[in-house]
Image (tube, coloured by chain):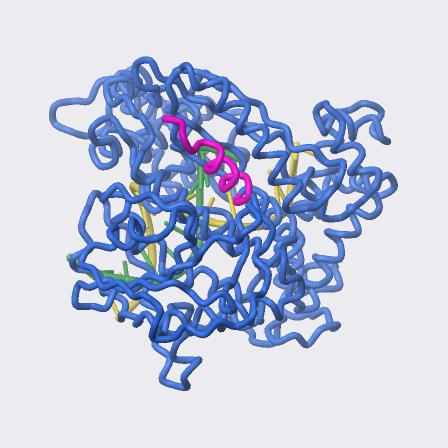
Chain colours: A blue, B green, C yellow
Amino acid sequence: MSEPPTRWALAEDGDGWWHAAPVAPAARTTAADPAEPADRAHPATPTGPATPRLRVRDPAEAVRAAPPGTRWVWRSTAAVYPRLLAAGARVERCHDIEDCELLLLGHEGRSGEPRSAAAAWARLTGGPVPPDPAPRAAERGAQDSLFEPRPSPVPLDALLAVHADQAARLGATAHPDRMRLLTAAESAAFLVAAEMNRAGLPWRADVHRALLTELLGERYAGGGEPRRLAELADRISAAFGRRVRPDLPADVIRAFAEAGIKLKSTRRWEIQGLDHPAVEPLLAYKKLYRIYTAHGWAWLADWVHEGRFRPEFLPAGTLTGRWVTNGGGALQIPKVIRRAVVADPGWRLVVADADQMEPRVLAAISRDPAFMEVAGRPEDLYTAVSRQGFSGDRDKAKLAVLGAVYGQTSGDGLKNLAALRRRFPRAVAYVDEAARAGEEGRLVRTWLGRTCPPPAVSGDPDEGGGGEAGVPQDRDDAWTPGYASTDTRARGRFTRNFVVQGSAADWALLLLAALRQALVGMRAELVFFQHDEVVVHCPAEEAAAVAEAIGAAGERAGRIAFGDTPVRFPFTTAVVECYADAK
DNA sequence: GACAGACGCGCC
DNA sequence: AAAGGGCGCGTCTGTC
């Protein structure tokens, strides 16, 4: 495909009519899906009165009228695409105006400004800029958006103008090709999310219920905690010699204090070393209580219907570009509960986990020759690192790498970090520089150009805020011996991690886009995505091809995102009937 | 009763 | 052994 795809714009007018028209080539924001080179700028072709325009009741009609492969320019994929899917109108690619606006505003250092299409249009025309509608509350189980405030409609011509403006602004970014790739990939991710929301994750409520009874015991008719939780609570009380409510941290701390043990909190790691008879039942209680409240019977009733768990996936939900889900805690499903995720009869789950994704991404973005070489070997990355100055100790090597990525400040990690720095100076310097940028109030970007917003303005406004770089602050915490305040150092840890976690998220978007494309023509469906892991539900006979496609998509994503590097992006892949069997 | 923030813990 | 990144979400707790 050398010809860039046709672009059409689609807009709703507020009276139930949809308007569609081709986009003049000069206005293309471009680029690409991961598969294709960025659309190049075209000579201006004015959209004259001769341009065909569609006015239809059903947007799916417009999709069917346009050439296959058209890139759809619309306000918001999440607002439009579910309806198209329901009408059987899948699209291949899109340009999500409001997501692109968010990315551009961030890149331009204007992250606080409203990102709606209406706001973008207002900025373009000098009108009053409407604030963004409040992020909608999770509507548990609700299927209708009847009572949501509807965003003001943006006429087709306004949409076209905003699109043209975005094309120009993309061209003015630090790395236009990367930024175009990012917007295209994230637009594709919104398509994937809508399709995943529709498909749902296969979920066996009967298996889940049996699991709950096995773990937690029967529920009593009168309500209250299930049997095993009640028994554990009794044992805890017995150990303290009085009634203690294990789900009340204050009560637990008081009870330990009465036993002569001072605690700062009731976190597991603080409790588990203690010598007290309540420790064992208390830890067991915490674990089960968590399952009971977060993924118990109530959760099942709320979230699983007709054999599917349907969380609402939301790409770009975090600052770093990771996804979040709205409701259902889909990205925190405890491992033990995954027993309930079972493929349909005759179908399989292909579960693929990218191996040590973040260190590999650090290798690629830092261009550290030694680290890239290590990340290109066909073996476990930490094992490979451990041969480089860690005398084969994989755990130490892993700790050092994670310490570098997360900003470890103490413990043995620091010593290991020094060894890492000697062997892979450029890689460590890359994250160190990101941390310094954060401490000095500068902005950092991911490889493709997603930009971290400046620090929140709450509290002292003198921190970071407006790019007064170069002066590490030292205020409000005399107790720390360091050169910078707690907040400043926290900011440094955030920006340090941002460049790695965010660039990994960049890669994951490309992975999803490439995989989605590879699955066209198969019955296989993407049903789950969690940062570095995908789950595809497919007929058993497609499983091998799907596994192959995932591996290819990962390598392709690495090549498209980071260019030609030796870094590999392998997966651990399992073809299973039950999700719990994948690990 | 509604709301906000802290806590604690699940996942990556 | 101890404390570093990103989240969602349920519960508790204090406040209005």
Residue A542 percent location from the top left of the image: 43, 19
Question: Is residue A260 in view?
Answer: no
Residue A299 percent location from the top left of the image: 26, 34
Q: Nearer the viewer, residue A211 or A120?
A: A120
Q: Nearer the viewer, residue A229 or A64?
A: A64
Magenta portion: prevailing SS class: helix
Where residue A339 sits, quadrant-wise, is top left
Residue A107, relative to residue A502: is it above or below? Answer: below
- Residue A383 as seen in the image, left or right of residue A128: right
Where residue A245 sits, quadrant-wise, is top left
Q: Residue furthest front?
A: A50
- Residue occupying image coordinates x 72% and y 38%: A401
- Residue occupying image coordinates x 53% and y 66%: A104
- Residue A273 as seen in the image, left or right of residue A302: right
Residue A533 percent location from the top left of the image: 51, 32
**The stretch drawn in magenta includes residue A500:** no
Residue A133 percent location from the top left of the image: 31, 67
Q: Nearer the viewer, residue A500 or A422?
A: A500
Q: Residue furthest bottom?
A: A126
**The stretch drawn in magenta includes residue A513:** yes
Q: How many marks?
A: 0
Question: Is residue A46 in view?
Answer: yes
Magenta region, residue range: A509-523
Q: Quadrant of the N terminus of chain A?
A: top right
